[in-house]
Image (cartoon, grey):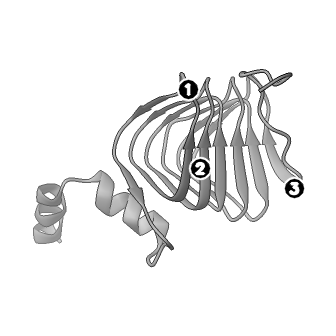
Amino acid sequence: MLGKSKNTVPTVQTKIGTIIGEGAVFDGNLTAPEAIRVDGTINGNCTCEANLIIGTEGKIEGNISAQNVTISGKVNGDIFVQGKLELLSTGRVSGNIVARSLVVDEDAYFDGRCTMTTALKTDPVQEIRTEAVPKAEIKAAEEES
């Protein structure tokens, strides 16, 4: 497209309630009712009831659950999206994806399994745990309980 740079994150017309700035590091699980923009690092799971935007310098080491996700940075974990996931040209994902709609730009990196769905019927966080852990490990854990 003319005049559009490959390395820009599209402007989202939604209220961003939480911003993790460039250079900031958040250790732990993050949950927010409004949109989140990540330009720093989150070491933990991220749950957002609205849109999640990961900038080119953003990085998440954990699982993600959100309404819509736009990735220009790096994610190492499973992603559950009720709506659309956009993986832009600078984006890198190592993990499984469950989404209703998926857009992958040229030069983006994705290593994992993708499942397309019409709607998430179960709790995304529980699905993350179930999908991320091999069934043999789940059975062993249940036997120990």
- Could you tell me the amino acid type at mark 3? Thr
Which numbered mark, 1 or 3, is in the foreground of this view?
A: 1
The local secondary structure at tag 3 comes to loop
Image check: 143 left or right of 25? left
Mark sitting on residue 14: 3
Q: Which residue has dot 2 on it?
A: 85
| Nearer to us in this view, 29 or 8 | 8
Q: Which residue has dot 1 on it?
A: 106
The local secondary structure at tag 2 comes to strand
Residue 84: x, y in percent? 61, 55
How busy is the neighbourhood of tag 3: few (under 14 within 10 Å), some, or many (20 plus)? Answer: few
Which numbered mark, 2 or 1, is in the foreground of this view?
A: 1
Q: Quadrant of residue 42?
A: top right
How busy is the neighbourhood of tag 1: few (under 14 within 10 Å), some, or many (20 plus)? Answer: few
Label 1, label 3: how far apart the Cα atoms are: 26 Å
- Could you tell me the amino acid type at mark 2? Leu
Residue 114: x, y in percent? 38, 50
Q: Residue furthest bottom?
A: 121
User: Looking at the image, which residue is at 65% across and 62% down?
Assistant: 67
